[in-house]
Amino acid sequence: MPVKEKVGIVVSNKMEKTIVVKVESRFSHPIYSKTIVKTKKYLAHDELSECNIGDQVLLHECRPLSKRKRWKLAKVLSKSSLIS
């Protein structure tokens, strides 16, 4: 069974071992053909607390870790240029 993956940007890292990741999905409206961008926030497990706000990350789906946490950080794709 393939592992579900999502790529997104870290919005918050203020919790211990948890990050909030914003994932954008772009699609064309079926009637008007306008490109629509929907965003969704996911809580993900960051064991080493290595992420900062603005980093682009890859998430893998996993077993439920808490009430809202069902994703784990797979790797950091690119570090943010912001100094935090």
Image (cartoon, helix red, strand yellow):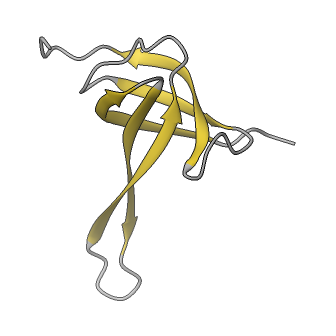
Residue shown at 26% from the left, 74% from the top: 34
Q: Where does the image place residue 4, in percent across and percent down from the top left?
A: 68, 43
Image quarter (top left, top right, bottom left or bottom right) of the C terminus: top left
On the rendered structure, is 83 left or right of 15? left
Q: Where does the image place residue 64, in percent across and percent down from the top left?
A: 69, 45
Q: Where does the image place residue 42, in percent across and percent down from the top left?
A: 46, 47
Residue 84, compared with residue 42, is above or below; it is above
Residue 60, compared with residue 52, is above or below; it is below
On the rendered structure, is 26 left or right of 73? left
Residue found farthest to the bottom: 31
Residue found farthest to the right: 1
Residue shown at 24% from the left, 27% from the top: 54
Q: Count numbered badges in the picture.
A: 0
Residue 23, compared with residue 25, is above or below; it is above
Examine the image and state in which quarter residue 52 appears: top left
Image quarter (top left, top right, bottom left or bottom right) of the N terminus: top right
Q: Where does the image place residue 81, in percent across and percent down from the top left?
A: 16, 14
On the rendered structure, is 47 left or right of 62? left
Q: Give 44 or 30, whichever is nearer the viewer.
A: 44
Residue shown at 36% from the left, 78% from the top: 29
